[in-house]
Image (cartoon, rainbow, N blue to C red):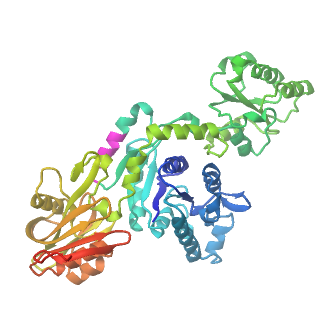
Amino acid sequence: MAKKVFIAAVGQDSGKTTTSLCLLHLARQKYTRIGYIKPFGAKSVTYRGMVVDKDVALMSEVFDLSRDLELMSPVVVLPETTHQMVDGLVSPDDLQERIVKACAELEKRCDFIVIEGSGHPGVGSIMQLSNARIAQLLDAPVLLVTGGGLGSVVDELALILALFEKEGVDVRAILVNKMIAEKRSRTLDYLQRALKSGPLRVIGGFNYHPVLANPTLSRISRLLDLPLHGNRQELHRIIHRVQVGAASTHRVAELLQSPSLLIVNSSRDQLLVTMAHLYRMPQYHDRIVGLVISGSVPISPITQQILDDSNVPYIRAENQVSAELYRKITRDVSKITADDREKLELIWKLSGSEFDFERLDDLFSLPGEAVAAGVVVPQEQERGCTTFGNHSLQCVVVGCLVRNAANEVLLIRNHKRGWEIPQGRIEEGEDLVEGLRREVREESGVEIEPGALAAVWSKLSPPAALIFTFQGRYLNGDLAPTGDSAEACWLTEAEALERVDNPVMQDRLKALLEYDGTAVYRAYTTRPYHIRAEWKLGDRPPL
């Protein structure tokens, strides 16, 4: 079974594609077969004779994934698609089936798959294919990409997580991108503290790097839909500054510092000639990436000859105004292409220093029930796990079937996994009973009197966990769920069995409801869920 990571983001242009590139680059150093899928493509291109999402073309080209190309872009939205959906000409069920089948086939071929969402989490809702819905269809845990900051990030999460929660999606962590390098540690520390009462891990991503954010000449040519003249070998030079040549020729030359794109009106012959000459001088060549020549006045023949002889890269934007061109260029968000070698090489370099792949890989190796029950990855060094060196060997978890005076059963609704009994990991220095009381109190708000040990579970799939489940009696307190719990309620036994739909949690609840005075032991594996061994603790274990 392939490991899957669904990359979503709090908004557009948060760095999903950069994160996907980084993940695939690091994953191919560990896994034999990597894969990529963009289930819902909003921006199409024709690549190798197929209409695919532009990010699919990028990943295929960079990582040589063309063998899976027919699976990587199952749904591509064309301009007329949304209207066809409203008119009933396109079936959302058919689109969902295409996505599920494509991903299932990709899972057979790969060990590690990146699933990249489109835009912000709500994109695709008109076709019943929001990011949250697709993640639910594919049973894929989510890595939520966000920018740096504190208040804005927490505010955005409050809105966005509701959409994923509605679909019952397992959002495991947020990845913080575009941080100011000097504030990286402080940013991550404050976010971890601000979100400590919830289920999300906070993982550091890329710092802000202008090279990744800034456009190339090739990007500007595509943006303006105009050809590049002159030195085409510099198509992929990165522009650090956009400058309008409105001042005197001498002043414009003085202002040239970082690699710049100059917007110059076609009537400014002296300035155009000067820039052409400076481009050929070593001390100025690195500062001039190219020119965008605006205006309706034809370029004079002698100036045109000098431009051509200098080989300076330029784009002729006839009948366009410099101010409008400046606004269009500076408001554009640059996207990486397979030809942007400088950007790709920087991503590969930074991935080793700014991106903790092992921590993320371990976190997404955990089954959902392990994350919700408090099982942690070795790199996080949290309490509750027995360790040897750097390797986590066993996590201890406690759970309780709590009954009130009406013989109703207490259930809580976990943010990620749905309805279950109160449960969680033992913290350092606690015994089982202390940990049990604390977990029930934190997840439901009530105090209990612990009763008999009713069942012990060994989770054999890594990371291993030993789970002790007890009977318990309600003492006092009003239901007030916090932390991992979104809701708590009292239910009859029949209602509780109907409410819990996770197979692991359902079996756990049944074992506790059927307790007859003798504790049972069960050992199981996950994905698929399978009981490997079972016996009553008073009996001899089966051979």
> In the depicted view, which residue is nearer to us: 132 or 71?
71
Residue found 21% across the figure and 53% down from its top: 384
Residues in magenta?
A: 188-197
Question: In the figure, 194 relative to 89: above or below?
Answer: above
> In the depicted view, which residue is nearer to us: 345 or 124?
345
Residue found 30% across the figure and 58% down from its top: 463
| Residue 214 makes an appearance in the image | no
Residue 454 placed where, x, y %?
Answer: 13, 73
Residue 332 placed where, x, y %?
Answer: 63, 43
Question: Which residue lies most toward the front here?
Answer: 543
Horizontal relation, residue 303 to residue 85: left or right? right
Question: In the figure, 470 relative to 305: above or below?
Answer: below
In this figure, what is the number of numbered marks? Answer: 0
Name the quarter where the N terminus is drawn.
bottom left
Question: In the figure, 328 relative to 82: above or below?
Answer: above
Name the quarter where the C terminus is drawn.
bottom left
Residue found 66% across the figure and 21% down from its top: 256
Residue found 25% across the figure and 70% down from its top: 523
Horizontal relation, residue 494 to residue 134: left or right? left
> In the depicted view, which residue is nearer to us: 521 or 243?
521
Does 138 lie within the magenta span?
no
Horizontal relation, residue 464 to residue 19: left or right? left
| Residue 233 makes an appearance in the image | yes
Please tell me whether the stretch drawn in magenta is mainly helix, strand or loop. helix
Residue 64 placed where, x, y %?
Answer: 63, 53
State the image quarter where residue 253 is shown.
top right
Residue 143 placed where, x, y %?
Answer: 43, 54
Does 194 lie within the magenta span?
yes
Horizontal relation, residue 150 to residue 100: left or right? left
> In the depicted view, which residue is nearer to us: 248 or 121?
121
Question: In the figure, 527 relative to 334: above or below?
Answer: below
